[in-house]
Amino acid sequence: MPVYCPGFSARRRSLLKGLGALGVGLSFMSRHSLSAEEKKLNFYNWDTYIGDTTLADFEKATGIAVKMDLFADNDELFAKLKAGNPGYDVIVPTNDNLERMIKANMVMPLDMAKLPNFKNLDAVFQDAAFDPGRKHSVPYLWGTVGIGFRKSKVEGTIDSWKVLFEDPKYAGRLALLDDAKIVIGSALKYIGQSLNSTDPAVLKKVEELLIAGKKNVKVFAKDNGQDLLASGDVDLTMEYNGDILQVMTEDDDLSYVVPTEGAEMWQDCLAIPTGAPRPENAHAFINFIMDPQTEAGIAKTVQYATPNAEAKKLMDKTYLENPAIFPPAEVVAKCEPALYLGEDVTKSRDEVWTRVKAA
Amino acid sequence: MAETLKPGSGPLDYGNRLWLKILFVAIFIALYAPIATLIAFSFNTDKRGVVWRGFTWDNYEKAWNNVALQEALLNSLTIAFIATIIATIIGAMAALFLWRFRFPFKPAYEGVMALPIVIPEICMGVSLLLFFIYTGMMGWSVGMPWPLNLINIIIAHVAFCFPFVAVVVRSRLVGFNRQLEEASKDLGASEWQTFWNVILPFMMPGLVAGALLAFTLSLDDFVITFFTSGPETVTFPVKVYSLVRRGVSPEINAASTVLIVITVIATIIAMKLQAPQKTGEG
Amino acid sequence: MDSWRGNLRVFWTLFTPGTFWLLIFFIIPLAWMFGISFSEKTSITETEFTGTLANYIRSFDAIYLQIIWKSIWISVLATVFCLLLAYPIAFGICFVPVRWKPLLLLLVILPFWINLLIRTYALIAVFRSQGYLNLVLGWVGLGPFEMLYNDGAVIMGLVYVYMPFMVLPLYATIERLDRSYLEASLDLGGSQFQTFWKVTLPLTMPGIITGIILVFIPCLGSFLTPDMLGGANAIMIGNVIERQFKSANDWPFGSALSFLLMYVTFAALALRAYLAARSKGVDV
């Protein structure tokens, strides 16, 4: 007896929808036919992750009013959509989460005919290992997870994960992200392994490293490491590059580095979740984002790297030549994307994380 | 005996004891210092809200013009208002019959009634989510016009609020002298008249306390709402949760300050309205 | 107490609404989840009922028991502090002149209306290393102290957040305390302390017990407070459960842990019932 099965409820809902459509179809046309789509769009995004005028510009251009709702992390996005789409049209999952959602049929295939601006993207971003042939997604922004620190409070050069995982010098002054995947991945890089390693012996080693190093950690930050850094609560933190760059504009004493051992290189994508009520509008919105003007406006605000070749042409030098946004080739070479490794790995990593936190 | 001559130092005048006054002041400072900070920082020019940089009204203007924040606030207040009314009525009825009647399996029934208080919020949130999806209520409510699309959240809030109301009202009813009720009936009052004229006035402080509790629980709830809300039904806590992870912005402080002012006024009005009614003490 | 048969019409009128709501919107969803705790994951989003006990066996792993134990003592401490602070407040409010009561009650409940997340963030602003408290302490040459990101901070946060839960039921009980008992005790030569210990406290026990339940239980299942105020060691069972429903995406295990937590709560309730029965036996 299948106890929980969204397929079942989806079928049930589509049946209801079908009956409804039949009823409506007898007199008028179905409300799900193309021209009947409401001038609305529900966009589910990260916070501070859109241009200042992007949504207003889109409404001006198409008449479609965008309602943006915010999620805090990939897990929240996944949890919200796992049990069925409550009404979102466009979402912004990170690569490994997207891979998981594709496997679970939680995102719809895109209609490339409706996305002419796709040609503006850098050639390297026009295909992706996690979404072969870009059937379900287009890239939005990309970046790294490294170390943000206060220059006046550290000695020497900060260039290794050692300061976060092993060095007692900064005990009580550092924060790690409260994200099992990223912390374990970074620790794997530190001991010279792939961040996608599933070897139990290697994971055991990482667990011991993290438990031993935990006494130095002040707090596991809920993606607010940049605030802890800015307010002086910690002097070193594991964070996403753009988050640190945003506080660097207010405080010259802060800096960001990708450790020499390498780090996670992620890519956030735009996708349409299965069951989206307004797929037409969703396509129009995704296409609008890939417009060079729009994308340049977004990149200027959020300080993350854009995959849009045409948009880059509109950006100034300080953005394009910032190594914290576009890391140099030798750094990129050491970085890796996270892969979706299956539910069993998620479970074993979660157990490692529970033991680390409870130790 | 000279003691009793001094005003305010009678054996039961605890309210005038110095140690109590000091304790009051200390506790209220502890309760309010963080809130005062919050309000002060709503006037801060620093957009991260961490360091004081200067005075401004801009945050209020921004909060006022923030449509998403307005909608979330309106949703929260609507939900809390409706859920409180339903929860107070249902909770008071439950308290009344648990207090008044003996019936088979009563201890078991009471145990079940206490469950919504006992169970971790997250379990309740997820179990309700499963329920709404399985019964099709999730998809069904999405397309409804406001405020009908809030129905799932209101149902969920009533489910966890009314047992709290029942507990509070019942602990008030325990002190009721049932001879009053008998006297009322002996004097020819009907069941309804007795309830309306004798029991209800006695219950009133419990009802008000219960309703206030339900209102605050509903307004403050994040976990259960998070699991049952969709893009059209974002509440204030859910909105705030998505905003504060990048630090408290003075804009949210400003919105909270407005919310505080509204609730203070509403509560004062409620208390004024309630004050003239004399409650018949047991 | 009347027999339910005595007045069927009144009984059913009062019985139906609460029971209906409880059954449809609480028991059924919960039973559904109970089923899931005996299920296995078959794919990313699907689970299948197999009657397996694996989820429960996993939850008896030493690590989870240790976390549950820690959650219990943190909640106990938070509840005790709440009671110690709330009792004098509730007591004081009952004995101040009538015109002050609404204002004082309002002052107690008011913080409660502000969103929990914002209040917790406000706490952070006051207590962090470069917060206001350390600033003030710095003027007199003390500190700075590390007051956040440890278990003490979690307890403080829980006390701050759940205090009104304790004050309200205590106030409701003390308010209807018959003061002639207190006068009688004092007149008969009892000291203030004896009067409090032998008369006031036993008579207000129902309110105390209600308050303890209302505070202890949400503390036990809390996860936002340890999340935001706790340090590297701050993990309570609520956090583990939350992760099962989010990042770990293991609803069967999360359901099993939830039921385990519920059993712990039942044990606490049973203990309370036992204590209440015993204290009644002594006092009456």
Image (spheres, rainbow, N blue to C red):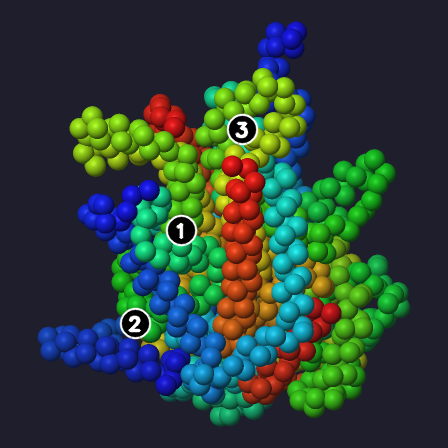
Q: Which chain carries label 2?
A: B
- The residue labelled by disc 3 is C93
Mark toward the viewer: 2 or 3: 3
Which mark sits nearer the N-terminus, 1 or 2?
2
Q: Name above or below for residue C52 compared with residue B36.
A: below
Residue C81: image location, x then y, percent: 65, 44
- The residue labelled by disc 2 is B136
Instruction: Answer whether labels 1 and 2 touch (C-beta < 8 Å).
Output: no
Residue at 54% over, 82% down: C54
Quadrant occupied by the N terminus of chain A: bottom left
Discs 1 and 2 carry the same chain letter: yes
Residue at 19% over, 47% down: C9
- Marks 1 and 2, how far apart in space? 26 Å
Quadrant occupied by the C terminus of chain A: bottom right
Residue at 33% over, 62% down: C23
Q: Name above or below for residue A52 compared with residue A312.
A: above
Q: Crowdedness of circle 2 by 10 Å Cα count: few (<14), some, many (20+)? A: some
Residue nearest the observer in this picture, A32 or A222: A222
Instruction: Answer whether labels 1 and 3 touch (C-beta < 8 Å).
Output: no
Residue A83: image location, x then y, percent: 41, 75
Q: Name above or below for residue B166 compared with residue B15.
A: below
- The residue labelled by disc 1 is B163
- Give the amino acid type for the residue marked by disc 1 in the picture: Pro
